[in-house]
Amino acid sequence: MRRLIAPLLLSLVWWLISCGPKPEAPSTVERPPAAVGGAPSHLTGKAASQIAELRWQTNQPENRILSGYNVYMAREDGEFEKITSSPYPGDLDPDYVTESFQAAGLENGVRYRFRVSTVYPNAAELFCDDTVEIIPRPEGRIRLKSSFSGVEAGFSFAGLQSVPTDDLTNDIYLAIINNQAHLASPQRIDIVLRQTEYFPILRRPGDNPESLPGLTGDGKELLPVKVGDQLYILTQDDCYALVLVEKINLKEEFLEVSFVYQMRPKTLIF
């Protein structure tokens, strides 16, 4: 009898277990996706000597956590390459609405194109729709003396150095006529010297002082100037310079101007 009871009890226990509720499989908990905001926008650029200054709107709230920004650059019509080895954390300005970046060590006279993206902690990368083109160019200051052979009598934009007035590389010299300062083309002295044309920048009331108008009228080989005048210079190489007259001393017969020289021929971009 005992031998029959033991197997019956085991069968009953097994039956009860099999009929009971089955344990639920552990559910898979999905993590919420990492927060991703908008892409940067309104990318702008400003050129300097061997430098491109970039600025963009972040389109991010103040407390958004980012990995940073990637900056991409292309030379002329080449492919874009990332120039930030790791995401750029942003500038030191506490303003989170805009960010800026400086690309240095560039070649003057070369056209560069730039793109910017925002990088999020989950590695998502959102690109700005804008692409900017920048041509770095030299800039500086010139002091011209009313002299044909002096060290500061003329200036070569291509060589970025002072030269005598009758030097074959000279682009500009100072002529004082009737107690009035004039910028003059060296070819006025001798036909073998370089020809330079001067175009005064004429602004109308209400014009944006930050923007530059195009060329107006014909170029002059002799142009009277006063302090504050702004003008374009076209050299014999078909290169433009943007010039601002900053100081005139008629008694000591010298003039000082600041300039930006565009090394790329036939390009009126500064």
Image: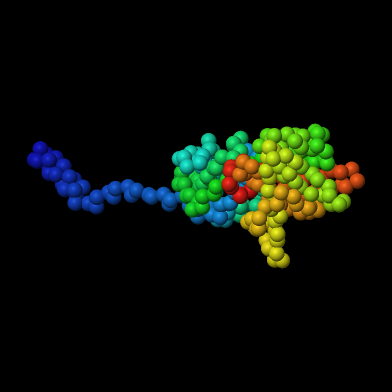
As drawn, is 255 to the left or to the right of 159?
right
Name the residue located 51 percent from the left edge and 52 percent from the top edge: 130
**Image coordinates for residue 254, horizontal then vertical, percent:** 84, 43
Decide which of 80, 265 is in the foreground and name it: 265
Q: Indicate whether 94 appears above or below 204.
A: above
Name the residue located 82 percent from the left edge and 34 percent from the top edge: 150
Q: Indicate whether 177 appears above or below 148.
A: below
**Image coordinates for residue 64, horizontal then vertical, percent:** 55, 52
Name the residue located 75 percent from the left edge and 41 percent from the top edge: 189
Residue 185 found in image quarter: top right
Decide which of 252, 112 is in the foreground and name it: 252
Q: Indicate whether 207 appears above or below 189.
A: below
Decide which of 140, 105 is in the foreground and name it: 140
Can see residue 116?
no
**Image coordinates for residue 71, horizontal then vertical, percent:** 53, 43
Residue 174 found in image quarter: top right
Extreme front residue here? 191
All told, the count of numbered labels is 0
Residue 191 found in image quarter: top right
Decide which of 203, 208 is in the foreground and name it: 203
**Image coordinates for residue 104, horizontal then vertical, percent:** 61, 37
Question: Looking at the image, what colour scheme do you see?
Answer: rainbow
Q: Indicate whether 94 appears above or below 155.
A: below
